[in-house]
């Protein structure tokens, strides 16, 4: 069913919205099925699991780290990761820059913004993120490239609340882009998962993270 699910999700995406297939906890065989159906971007939330899958699967796959990043494990993904979604503290940016320098790479990443009314979510708040983008980030962190923002809405049935949270993140993205960080490569707004990606893309998301609607319930 993976190929059929993938086709259905892709048909529901707006033009220009990139799909990250969330393959965490899923076997290599399920990823291979999605790969055969044309999917090339996969997201994992555990660095060592992602590194093991990287070794076993085709090298044209783009691996995205979508989970909470542990600084002491960044070294395992630095040689190959394509995009790191959860840069939720400046010390994390420093750690990623340090490990990227060791492997002579410039690694793309997203700054995570705390938009949900839940303590369990990570991320910068608005004042912290404006303070961050007032720095000379290219000089401070020459081995990483901040390509955009990421946020996760509150897990709730209240779709109006989810929409408000996504709208707030889009406004923040637009303001940073226009006033603080007008780089050509600062263009990714990653918001929306299986349960709320339709609202997210209506509110300006250009990258969605979908797992269970493709692979079924998580193991």
Image: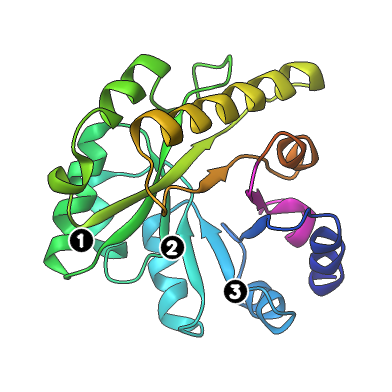
Q: Badges 3 and 1: C-beta atoms under 8 Å apart?
A: no
Please tell me the numbered disc located at residue 165. Answer: none
Labels 3 and 1: the sequence-earlier one: 3
Q: Residue 164: where, in percent of width, then height?
A: 69, 18
**Label 2 near label 1: C-beta < 8 Å?**
no
Where is mark 1, residue-wise? 100
**Which corner quadrant holds the N terminus?**
bottom right
Sequence-first disc among 3 and 2: 3
The tally of labels here is 3
Q: Alpha-carbon neighbours of circle 1 within 10 Å: few (<14), some, or many (≥20)? A: many
User: Which portion, as a residue range, is magenta?
Assistant: 205-219
Q: Is residue 208 above or below residue 102?
A: above
| Figure check: 66 above or below 122 | below
Residue marked by disc 2? 49
Left or right of residue 69, residue 30 in this image? right
Residue positioned 51% across, 76% down in the render? 61
Residue 140 position in % (x across, y down) = 14, 43
- Foreground: 110 or 56? 110
Quarter placement of the C terminus: bottom right
Disc 3 designates what residue?
A: 40
Crowding at dot 2, Cα within 10 Å, few <14 / some 14-19 / many 20+, comes out as few
- Residue 93, by quadrant, is top left
Q: Name the spot of residue 169 as percent of width and height, x first.
A: 56, 27
* Mark 3 to mark 1 CA distance (whole Å): 23 Å
* Residue at left offset 56%, top offset 64%: 42
169 part of magenta stretch: no
In this view, the residue in front, 28 or 126, is: 126
């Amino acid at each position: 069913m993976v190929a059929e699910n993938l086709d259905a999700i892709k048909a529901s995406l707006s033009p220009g919205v990139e799909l990250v297939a969330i393959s965490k906890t899923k076997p290599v065989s399920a990823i291979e099925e999605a790969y055969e159906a044309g999917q090339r971007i996969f997201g994992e939330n555990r660095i060592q699991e992602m590194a093991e899958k990287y070794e076993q699967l085709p090298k044209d796959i783009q691996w995205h780290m979508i989970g909470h990043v542990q600084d002491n494990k960044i070294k395992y993904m630095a040689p190959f990761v394509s995009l790191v979604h959860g840069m939720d503290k400046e010390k994390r940016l420093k750690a990623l820059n340090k490990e990227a320098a060791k492997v002579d790479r410039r690694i793309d990443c997203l700054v995570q913004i705390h938009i949900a009314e839940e303590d369990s979510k990570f991320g910068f708040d608005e004042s912290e993120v404006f303070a961050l983008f007032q720095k000379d980030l290219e000089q401070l962190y020459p081995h990483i490239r901040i390509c955009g923002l990421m946020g996760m809405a509150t897990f709730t049935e209240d779709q109006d609340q989810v929409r408000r949270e996504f709208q707030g993140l889009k406004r923040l993205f637009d303001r940073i882009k226009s006033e603080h960080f007008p780089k050509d490569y600062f263009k990714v707004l990653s918001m929306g998962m299986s349960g709320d990606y339709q609202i997210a893309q209506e509110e300006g998301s250009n990258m969605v993270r979908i797992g269970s609607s493709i692979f079924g319930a998580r193991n």
